[in-house]
Every structure is written in C-alpha cells, then in structure tokens.
Image (tube, rainbow, N blue to C red):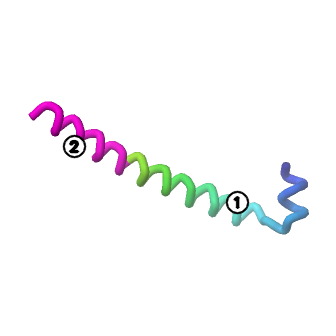
Amino acid sequence: MAEDLKNTGVGVQSVDEITRDLAQKCASLADISRQLYARWVELLTH
C-alpha cells in the first residue's frame, strides 16, 4: 500500500490532508443527520 502511494507520487502530507478533509466531511454529515433526526422525532411527537 505504501509502495503504491510512493509510485503514484502521493506524499504522506497529502494523505494526511485527505484524511483530515474526510474527517471534517464526516463530522458535518453527522451533524446534519442528527439535526434531521431531531426534527423528524419532533414532527412525530407533536
């Protein structure tokens, strides 16, 4: 795996950046789904 990354010219730094970017996207997706779920529960209980 590490060999493949070296061959494609992807450095460790850019892998870290990609990972960080994905983590941020996942976090915001989790926030959005929490909000949607809360709204859905609100609609059902009222």
Decide which of 21, 41 is in the foreground and name it: 41
Disc 2 marks a residue whose amino acid type is Arg
Left or right relative to 22: residue 15: right
Residue located 36% across and 49% down the image: 31
Q: Residue at x 66, y 59 (%)?
A: 16
- Quadrant of res 13: bottom right
Q: How many marks?
A: 2
Residue 39 sits in quarter: top left
**For the point 36% across and 45% down, which residue is it?**
33
Q: Mark 1 touching mark 2, by CB under 8 A? A: no
Picture coordinates of residue 30, whole percent (x, y): 41, 46
Q: Position of residue 5 (x, y in %)?
A: 83, 58
Using a 10 Å C-alpha cutoff, classify the residue at mark 2 as few (fewer than 14 neighbours), some (14 to 19) or many (20 or more): few
Residue farthest toward the left in the current orientation of the protein: 46
Q: Residue at x 86, y 65 (%)?
A: 8
Q: Is residue 26 left or right of residue 3?
A: left
Q: Secondary structure at mark 1?
A: helix
- The image shows residue 45, relative to residue 15, as above or below, that is above
Q: Amino acid at mark 1?
A: Val
User: Magenta residues?
Assistant: 31-46
Quarter of the image containing the C terminus?
top left
Q: Which callout, 1 or 2, points to the residue nearer the camera?
A: 2
Q: Secondary structure at mark 2?
A: helix
Q: Is 27 placed above or below 5 here?
A: above
Residue where numbered disc 2 is placed: 39
Q: Residue lying furthest top in this view?
A: 45
Of labels 1 and 2, earlier in sequence is 1
Q: Which secondary structure dominates the residues rendered in magenta?
A: helix
Residue 10 rendering spot, x and y as whole percentages = 79, 65
Q: 10 Å neighbourhood of mark 1: few (<14), some, or many (≥20)?
A: few
Tell me, for residue 15, which label it has, or none.
Answer: 1
